[in-house]
Amino acid sequence: MATHDSSAGDGFVPFFRRYAKSWVHAVAAAGMTAFGTLTIVHRGFAVLALASYVVPPVVLYLLRTPIEGSDEDTATDRQHDAAAADRATDSGGGSLERTETEGDTEAAAITEPESEEGTEPSRAPGSATTVSKEQRRDADPAAARETAADRAPQAERSRRWELVDVPTETTLRDVCVTETGAVYAVGDDGQVLTADPVDGDPAEREWMVALEDGPAAEGENLSGVDATAGGEAVWIAGDSGAVGRLEAETRRHTDYSAPAGITDNWPGVAVAGPNGDETILLINGSGDVLRGRYRDGECSWDEPVTPGSGSSLSGITLADASIGYCCDTNDGVFETTDGGDSFDRIGPVGAGGTLENLATLGRGDCLVSADDGVVHRYGGSTWTPERVGEEAICGIARREGETIVCDADGVIHERVEAEWEEVDTRAPESLLAVSVDADGERAVAVGEDGTVAERW
């Protein structure tokens, strides 16, 4: 590891940035915490706590004591300072990305701005500099002014939710935004709506009817939709055993209704795997999960399994072809690690209301919404409730760094880091489902009477 000399003309801010990543800073922070705790004994320890944190960097800087750091870190510091100067003159700047971690500790990855030629600075793999929010604020005064970015990714805050017109007035019960940015929504009377990805002006987007009366042309109400990885195929499910598969490119659909001879209502469907190698999970009101496997144009179904006591299942989701979760109306949540072949109970949640829906990013990560306005977060062993509102939270969607929910009063809430915020746009009818793509480029909520809200 190379040694950087603070007397090289970099100034205090780059010096402190390196200092904040050193063992000296860690010891100083520990000392401040220890003395701060002792203030319950005597208030005088507050002086020692402050001194233990402030004195070391000041002394090291004045003595020009070298702080250990890589040459790469030095280059990053100088590029960061140059970027700060550019922001002051050109209003340009880097972006801050947020990631929620299992223990609710969160870090911001500082993405360097593009160079004048429009190309990104070269960087060795894995060399992105990461600092905590507190370190960034202490080290860089400009970071303290980025309070909005501390609450949400800069790109998200520049977008807005708006109500859009769609060619139906029937209730839409579920929605899926695929990896390509295309949208599929399903609802009553077997209607399936779709909207293509939008590369240009969002106002130019067009919604159309992809399927008029369900996969079997019987007009069954549809209540579930999900897409394969890559978004090349979409599965839909609903009443009277209705199940179908749509090909995104050709809009051709295949009817797989009454899978395994079962004609139950399917309130939800979850799909994982790429096109042609798909795992499909369906849930019903008897507490059963039916697992399907689609391979090279052929679909087969296993015997249904009952994860819980037989209470009606209200939601199901898959993070990948192995990891998934489902919830029931009796406070039960169940985890699968083998793609729905078996489930383990990880509840009860301890909810004061009935569980409505759930979302996940992977194993040990699950958020469940309830009809009393509370979201319950699973961290691998325990459940933690977070009140979002007062109405039933019918829809919940999740991606890295963000969770979005919608409720029966037409309200949408976004959570970035640990803070829930109600968006300005309010739907005139109940919102029943919401979906967002992995990059947050497009988010869509749907509900009663053909209500659709989009974020761009």
Image: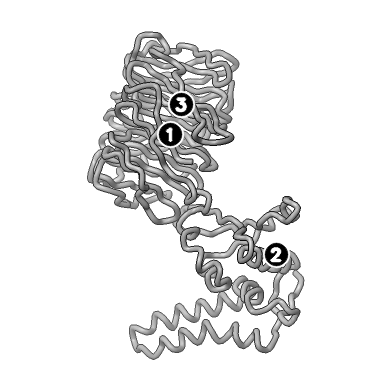
Relative to residue 316, is residue 403 depicted above or below?
A: below
Residue type beneath disc 1: Thr
Relative to residue 51, is residue 309 depicted above or below?
A: above
Residue 55 in percent (x, y) is at 55, 87
Of labels 3 and 1, earlier in sequence is 3
Residue type beneath disc 2: Gln
Q: Which quarter of the figure is the N terminus placed in?
A: bottom right
Q: Nearer the viewer, residue 196 or 17?
A: 196
Q: Where does label 2 land, which residue?
A: 79
Residue type beneath disc 3: Tyr
Asked whether, in this view, residue 445 is left or right of residue 77, the answer is left
Of labels 2 and 1, earlier in sequence is 2
Of labels 2 and 3, earlier in sequence is 2
- Under circle 1, the secondary element is strand
Q: Hey, which quadrant is residue 61 in on the image?
A: bottom right
Q: Where does label 3 land, which residue?
A: 184
Q: Where does label 1 land, which residue?
A: 317
Relative to residue 111, is residue 433 depicted above or below?
A: above
Residue 123 visible (yes or no): no
Q: Label 2 to label 1, Cα distance in Å?
A: 42 Å
Question: How many C-alpha atoms fall within 10 Å of the one at disc 3: few (<14), some, or many (≥20)?
Answer: many
Q: Residue at x 37, y 84 (%)?
A: 39
In this rendering, the label closer to the viewer, 3 or 1: 3
Q: Label 3 to label 1, Cα distance in Å?
A: 16 Å
Q: Contact, CB < 8 Å: mark 3 with mark 1?
A: no
Q: Residue at x 30, y 45 (%)?
A: 349
Looking at the rendered structure, which numbered label has been put on residue 352?
none
Residue 8 in percent (x, y) is at 75, 79
- Under circle 2, the secondary element is helix
Q: Hey, which quadrant is residue 444 in on the image?
A: top left
Asked whether, in this view, residue 335 is left or right of residue 24, the answer is left
